[in-house]
Image (spheres, grey):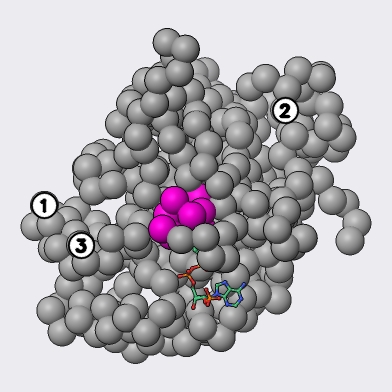
Amino acid sequence: MENVFDYEDIQLIPAKCVVNSRSECDTKISLGGYSFKLPVVPANMQTIIDEKIAITLAENGYFYIMHRFQPEQRIDFIKDMKSRGLIASISVGVKPEEYEFVRQATEENLIPEFITIDIAHGHSNAVIEMIHHIKEHLPDSFVIAGNVGTPEAVRELENAGADATKVGIGPGKVCITKIKTGFGTGGWQLAALRWCAKAASKPIIADGGIRTHGDVAKSIRFGATLVMIGSLFAGHEDSPGETFEKDGKLYKEYFGSASEFQKGEKKNVEGKKMYVEHKGSLKDTLVEMEQDLQSAISYAGGTNLDAIKHVDYVVVKNSIFNGDRVY
Ligand SMILES: NC(=O)C1=CN([C@@H]2O[C@H](COP(=O)(O)OP(=O)(O)OC[C@H]3O[C@@H](n4cnc5c(N)ncnc54)[C@H](OP(=O)(O)O)[C@@H]3O)[C@@H](O)[C@H]2O)C=CC1
Ligand SMILES: Nc1nc2c(ncn2[C@@H]2O[C@H](COP(=O)(O)O)[C@@H](O)[C@H]2O)c(=O)[nH]1
């Protein structure tokens, strides 16, 4: 394939500014008939989101996707969000008990506004059958399906009824799929996103590999409606991962959903655990992200995210950090 590149290989080219202040720039997106403050969603992983964070995000106008690793709590989670008048956005897998869960939600009239089908290799009949099952029983739920890494997969999941697809096989910080299997979009996630977005007729979520706030703007440029972020969100004081102290410094744990820490066994492990530096609150990072994105919109010469979609760019192979890898 030609033109293979990743986030750090790209710089977007500024266009003439049309605002007097960055505060005039609007970072909102719309998805599934709802409007959200930012084109960003924290990863549906156990060290990234819990019920408390989901409530805070929903109350403050941000999109969220709850993880699927406490299946016994999912019905109560939907009830709780509904009782607060908040959007319910949950994840499911594809195993037989997940079919039963969807039936139960239907019977109890607990209709999540968003359902994300979250498996490693989303271009599969297992996902297509789950899309059909959800659309049959919960036709009003907006279905996000993934993960995939090719245009064929995007088209097939969209044709099966997915309302959005999630792109990214292996670019994640705690991912070892690329090493253990040799497959994935790791190292060329941004080019894979572009490839997939050209085939898409519905929104695409770019998942994995976001290392800086500028990568959000780059994802928008190459076709994402929003981005899913894990590692950049893992170190907050309110992140669910355990806090750990070493040599007087605080860290938070961040582990993969396919790691042995998540699975409780060493079977088909495709994720690892790492420690990220402890930092302030998620709220502060989201505010900073909004400001950075407002600035990006101003550099794009517009007043909203659409402006970023059309800017020119250059490929500066591995050089945007000028040899400085610290960011
Ligand atoms: N975005 C990414 O790059 C990746 C993300 N992950 C994350 O890890 C978590 C666990 O994922 P996953 O293992 O799919 O979830 P599950 O363990 O729930 O597996 C889902 C089902 O798909 C089957 N399955 C899993 N991988 C494959 C494959 N490569 N080929 C055929 N069947 C497969 C499993 O069977 P069996 O286990 O028997 O094969 C199981 O029946 C998810 O949250 C996922 O998002 C994991 C890897 C890559
Ligand atoms: N290959 C694996 N990928 C994983 C695993 N757990 C999560 N993920 C993916 O990573 C992103 C987050 O990426 P980041 O670069 O922002 O940290 C997440 O949304 C999943 O798609 C795993 O165990 N293996």
Name the residue nearer the viewer: 167 or 86.
Answer: 167
Which residue lies at the image location 39% right of the left edge and 43% below the top edge?
48
292 over 5 or under it: above or below: above
Q: Amino acid at mark 2?
A: Pro
**Tags 1 and 2 in contact by the CB under 8 Å rule?**
no
What's the CA distance linking mark 1 and mark 2?
A: 43 Å
Q: Amino acid at mark 1?
A: Arg
- Residue 185 against residue 237 in the figure, above or below: below
**Which residue is outermost to the top?**
248
Q: Secondary structure at mark 1?
A: loop
Element at label 3: helix
Question: Which residue in the protein does label 3 denote?
Answer: 73
Which residue is pictured at 8% across the width and 57% down the height?
Answer: 83
Give the mark nearest the N terminus, 1 or 3: 3
Numbered tag placed on residue 84 in the rendering: 1
Q: Single out the residue that lies furthest toward the right.
A: 2
Residue 251, position in %: x, y?
44, 24
Going from the N terminus, do you reach mark 1 or mark 2 first?
2
Labelled disc at residue 59: none
- Count residues near mark 3 (Cα–Cα under 10 Å), then give few for <14, some for 14-19, many for 20+: few
Question: Does the beta carbon of the residue at mark 2 sit less than 8 Å from ligand 2?
Answer: no
Q: Amino acid at mark 3?
A: Gln
Image quarter of the N terminus: bottom right
The stretch drawn in magenta includes residue 261 = yes
Looking at the image, tell me whether mark 2 or mark 3 is earlier in sequence order: 2
Q: CA distance from mark 2 to mark 3?
A: 47 Å
Vertical placement of residue 249 versus 32, above or below = above
Q: Position of residue 142 (x, y in %)?
A: 37, 70
Residue that numbered label 2 is attached to: 14
Select label 1 or label 3 by which is in front.
3
